Image (cartoon, rainbow, N blue to C red):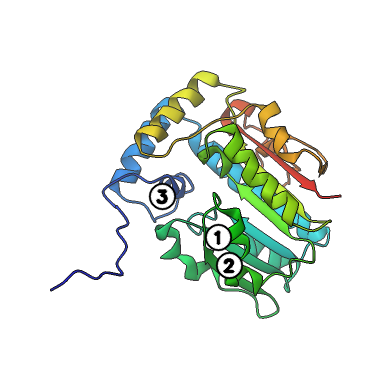
Amino acid sequence: MAADEGAVDLELDRAHSARMYDYFLGGTTNFPADREQAGRAMAVFPAVLVAARANRQFMHRSVRHLAQLGMRQFLDVGTGIPTSPNLHEVAQQVVPEARVVYTDNDPIVLTHAQALLRSRPEGRTAYSQGDARDPEALMKSPELTETLDLNRPVALSLIALLHFIPGERAAHEIVEYFKDVLPSGSTLTISHVTPDFDPDAIASTVRTYKAAGSPVQARSREEFTRFFDGWELLDPGVTVTHRWRPDAEHDLSQVTDAEAACYGAVARKP
């Protein structure tokens, strides 16, 4: 029998960063190769589980806060494997009519995208297969343009994405493109791994990811803050993810900055 020409090789025998992250979050969409490489990351940076979960909770809090501030449209670039509660579940809990577009270039995410499309009837969700490294094509995808009104403010999320785009020019050009095309009142949410608190552990983790085929570039506070140039940072500004507007629901007071190891911030376009 001939092989299916439309079949996608998910390379389950090789570790994948999205499936490793899923493992760190306690998910089940991961395989022995992913768990083996995740184990290596945990050996050099035991707090990686804490960092992943602090990052995910930062996403939840930032989305909830933006929905409470009146944002009704959300664009999540680099979505990753669905892990409930997903972004649309958080947003639509506050604003049932919220519209959400998820995008990712990873075929493993596409295979699970149906979990992202369970919108409340008042709102809408869509999934677009797209690559953050081609933001122009991403912004023109029919799934996006049919779901979001790009003449109205959009809350853009780049959660744990930009550290997978090494090179200062490439990462900043991507962000600047999004900043240019989004209308006034839009917001930008970013989280990003940093070497500022435990440089040796983060350097070892970066090498582990590189060995798995996923180059990573950790960035300093100064490098991270540059992504928001020209936009107004919302309170509390640039901080470690678990310190960004903490809530009582998830007590992260015992987490150290070195364990969280990621900066997070939200800014608004004037």
Residue 100's x, y, as percent?
Answer: 65, 66
The reply to whether the C-beta atoms of the residues labelled 2 and 1 are less than 8 Å apart is yes
Residue matched to label 3: 19
Q: Nearer the viewer, mark 3 or mark 2?
A: 2
Q: Residue at x 75, y 45 (%)?
A: 266
Quick one: SS at disc 3? Answer: helix
Upstream in sequence: badge 2 or badge 1? 1
Residue type at mark 1: give it: Thr
Please say if 25 is above or below 114. above
Is residue 16 visible to the viewer in this orientation of the structure?
Answer: yes
| Quadrant, the N terminus | bottom left
Please report contact status of discs 1 and 3: CB closer than 8 Å, yes or no: no
The quarter holding residue 207 reads: top left
**Label number found at residue 141:** 2
Q: What amino acid does circle 2 point to?
A: Ser
Residue 72 image position (x, y, % from top left): 76, 66
Alpha carbon distance from label 1 to label 3: 16 Å
Location of residue 92 (image quadrant): bottom right
Q: Position of residue 216 (x, y in %)?
A: 48, 34
